[in-house]
């Protein structure tokens, strides 16, 4: 049997979903199955891009429902899994017993493993470590700030390489290796390590900057990053460096916007007394109760700084 797996590309959970599904399929249906892999990315308008159905079975994992009858397997856990009400109706009417959706799952990887065990009687104990880490990382369920920031764990290194590497062959080689090797063995591969090295360097530079620029008092740590060239950094760095800060507020300037970022430190040991989304909405921003942002045009950086200072003052004890 030739099986083609379409999976969420540039995503640790997507790669682990593909690995778990392949092992499950081999065990349950065809030990000699030949697998091919194709990554999917979200595109404007919800297009799936070019999908070639050139195998006997086609699976979509950790990605939106696709109405084609060529798709014989589907697993997803994203809230927004259906592009249209017609797609959702097609899924609800499906009687194949091979299409599964549960937005309560933190990771699609664990969802597939649980279905394999509960519906098909297939246990995959050799993948327990992989399943555990996919659930931690996709659900941002880190035990503490140290775990979220420290890149020593092989799963964290693989996540950053999968998210950041433009080398499609490398990303697919990781999907195959995850089926046979431990996370530590996969991460130690020289190709993975050479892709990881510049990412590690950027991360360490960001930590150093946050250490230099943080102004921490009365339960709030404040960062003015507007003079720094720092696109994309680990959002947990402030909580790791300033564990007693209940909130973090930063202001930054990118090519397309000036931005105020506000977050609650879940490891501060203190209750959250403010709704951050509501606070940001006052300035035209938004978000969730625990994290939010205000975006302004790039030239309004002085106003962004003033807003950030106002928000920080309001959040102080
Ligand atoms: Mn996922």
Image (cartoon, grey):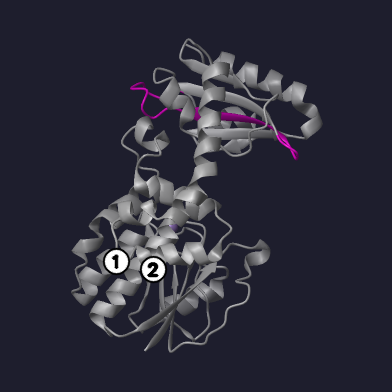
| Residue 63 higher or lower than 52, as above or below | above
Q: Main secondary structure of the magenta part?
A: loop
Residue 176: numbered disc:
2
Asked if the stretch drawn in magenta spans residue 86, the answer is no
Give the residue drawn at x 38%, y 68%.
176
Residue 180: numbered disc:
1
| Residue 187 higher or lower than 118, as above or below | above
Q: Is residue 81 visible?
A: no
Q: Which residues, given as a range, are shown in magenta?
A: 254-273
Q: Is residue 38 visible?
A: yes
Residue 33's x, y, as percent?
Answer: 34, 84
Q: Are marks 2 and 1 in contact (CB under 8 Å)?
A: yes
Mark 2 neighbour class, 10 Å CA radius: few under 14, some 14 to 19, many 20 or more:
many
Residue 136's x, y, as percent?
Answer: 34, 47
Residue 306 falls left or right of residue 143: right
Q: Is mark 2 within 8 Å of ligand 1?
A: no
Mark 1 neighbour class, 10 Å CA radius: few under 14, some 14 to 19, many 20 or more:
some
């Amino acid at each position: 049997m030739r099986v083609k797996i379409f999976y969420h590309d540039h995503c640790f959970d997507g790669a682990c979903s593909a690995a778990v599904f392949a092992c499950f399929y081999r065990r349950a249906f065809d030990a000699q199955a030949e697998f091919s892999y194709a990554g999917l990315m979200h595109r404007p308008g919800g297009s799936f891009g070019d999908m070639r159905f050139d195998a006997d079975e086609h699976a979509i994992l950790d990605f939106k429902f696709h109405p084609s009858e060529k798709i014989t397997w589907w697993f997803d856990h994203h809230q927004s899994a259906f592009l249209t009400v017609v797609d959702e109706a097609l899924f609800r009417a499906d009687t194949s017993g091979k299409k599964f959706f549960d937005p309560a799952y933190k990771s699609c990887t664990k969802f597939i493993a649980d279905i394999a065990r509960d519906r098909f009687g297939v246990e995959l104990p050799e993948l327990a470590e992989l399943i555990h880490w996919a659930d931690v990382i996709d659900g941002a369920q880190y035990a503490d700030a140290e775990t979220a920031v420290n890149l020593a764990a092989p799963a964290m290194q693989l996540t950053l390489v999968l998210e950041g590497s433009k080398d499609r062959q490398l990303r697919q080689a990781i999907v195959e290796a995850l089926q046979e090797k431990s996370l530590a063995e996969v991460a130690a591969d020289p190709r993975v390590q050479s892709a990881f090295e510049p990412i590690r360097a950027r991360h360490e530079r960001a930590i150093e900057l946050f250490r230099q620029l943080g102004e921490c008092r009365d339960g709030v740590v404040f960062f003015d990053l507007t003079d720094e060239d720092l696109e994309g950094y680990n959002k947990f760095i402030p909580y790791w460096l300033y564990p007693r800060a209940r909130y973090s507020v930063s202001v930054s300037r990118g090519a397309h916007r000036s931005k105020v970022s506000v977050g609650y430190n879940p490891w501060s040991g203190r209750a959250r007394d403010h709704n951050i989304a509501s606070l940001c909405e006052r300035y035209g921003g938004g978000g969730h109760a625990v994290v939010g942002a205000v975006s302004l045009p790039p030239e309004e950086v002085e106003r962004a700084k003033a807003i950030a200072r106002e928000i920080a003052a309001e959040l102080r004890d």
